[in-house]
Amino acid sequence: MEDLAEALVSEIVKKITRTSDLNSLSLVSKQLYKAEGTQRGAIRVGSGLCTATEALTSLCARFPNLRKVEIDYSSWKPGHGKQLDNKGLFVFSSHCSSLTDLTLSFCSYIDDFGLGCLAYCVTLVSLRLISIPKITSMGLFSIAVRRTSLSALHLIDCEKIDSVEWLEHLGRYGSLEELVVKNCKGINHHDLLKFGSGWMKLQKFEFERKRGICDLIPFDDVFDSSYDAHSMDTYDICCESLKDLRLVRIKTWPEIGLRVVLGKCKALENLSLEYVHALNDNDIIALSRSCSNLKSISLGLNLQYYSSDVGYCETRTSFTDNSLYALALNCRMLQIVDLKFTGCSRRWPSEIGFTQEGFLVLIQSCPIRVLVLNTANFFNEVGMKALSSSPHLETLELIFCPAVTDAGMRLIAHTPCLSTLALRVCHNITDVGVAEMRRARKLESLVIEYCSKVSLQAAQGVAKSVHYSEKSTAALREKVGLVGDIFGAC
């Protein structure tokens, strides 16, 4: 091995991607040890980083060309040794000259002073701060002033951030293309409009408010079904470069806030709206008219109070068939549709603003490849028959769709391109329905989870890859939503 040309050794190392394999390779010879250290571009360390400053210094010396570093103390305990502190962050500026991407998670010994040290990392363009309890807006402002070259910033569970001067500065002088703010209770969605001209450069934006039990029940407010936030030029912002937008658990009433963004994203390709209060059809209509490139839409909807056309209050999810018609007419590139309806009873289909007729117009108008329906009580054999003639559908996931039965399975088995099927909490599908899929011999992957009338024996052999579970997992309960009401009704 020592006689191999350096260029050949480098090519060998480039072909190996698994960290465990690279670690083993470095033990073979001094030459491979040196080559592997020189070429390693990313590391992830955590609770095992004891005497953290010294250990990090050694790592940076061992891997001089590191570009991406993740430090994660999520499983740290006092007995594991001392965490990385402010002093340790100086290591990056002095020993890691190629660093471009840094993630700090659950680093409880780092505060604003330490964060300011990162301003001297001249190549840093991507910064993710996750559950850093001591940092405040002051620390972020020091980063914003000195590192205007940042292109990506993630702030997750940083609860002491309570002002947005840093955001205004980055909007005015910075070059952010990706901004993610989750569970930072001091920042509301109205504050984020202060990003100003920064919206013009932004390509990915996520804002998520912290989860609460009130997200699962309707508010007392009655929202106007006809209100159009996009008929007024309330906010003079431009976000024509935005391609990915995700809004989770925000209230857009009485202040419009981020709601206005929906009608201004001409380049939008991926949209996710989860439990955003007070939206109505006018929001989706405005979005569809400006977003002809939309490829993916995910809607997590719960019950809200809306005024009706005849003057009384109705309890339903945010959007109606008018939204589906607008998407079908204007978004002809739509390929991924994910619809989740939380808290809606299977006995009251009217609680869901969508009907099967409106849904089928969307499916038949767009080249849908991936479809996920969660608690869609309106979807039955008629819908399955329509899907069976869809020329593009490759992946179908049904979660607690009580009206889907073996008859629907017989129909869906004839879908031309269907290769992946997931059935979760579908108690009206039995071994007979699964047998229809076996006869079709089309599936590459089948997932059966907590479907009480489907046995493991029936699932085996239906697809090349089969996952079967007769119990409800935590992940599944999270997918379904109101666990007690839904599972109790099954």
Image (cartoon, helix red, strand yellow):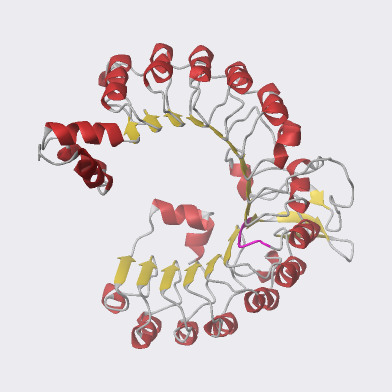
The residue segment tinted magenta is: 293-300
- The quarter of the picture where residue 77 lies is top left
Report which quarter residue 376 is drawn in. Answer: bottom right
Q: Is residue 193 visible?
A: no
The one nearer the camera, 378 or 109, is 109
The answer to whether 372 is drawn above or below residue 107 in the figure is: below
- Asked if the magenta segment contains residue 295, the reply would be yes
Residue 265, magenta (yes or no)? no
Residue 154 visible in the snapshot = yes
Rendering coords of residue 192 (x, y %): 71, 34
Residue 233 screen position, x and y as percent: 88, 45
Q: Residue at x 57, y 26 (%)?
A: 159
User: Which residue is drawn at the image coordinates 66% and 41% (left, top)?
Assistant: 202
Across and down, in percent, residue 479 comes to: 49, 56
Q: Quadrant of the N terminus?
A: top left
Q: Residue at x 76, y 34 (%)?
A: 196
Left or right of residue 49, residue 347 in this image: right
18 left or right, relative to 484: left
What secondary structure is the stretch in magenta mostly built from? strand
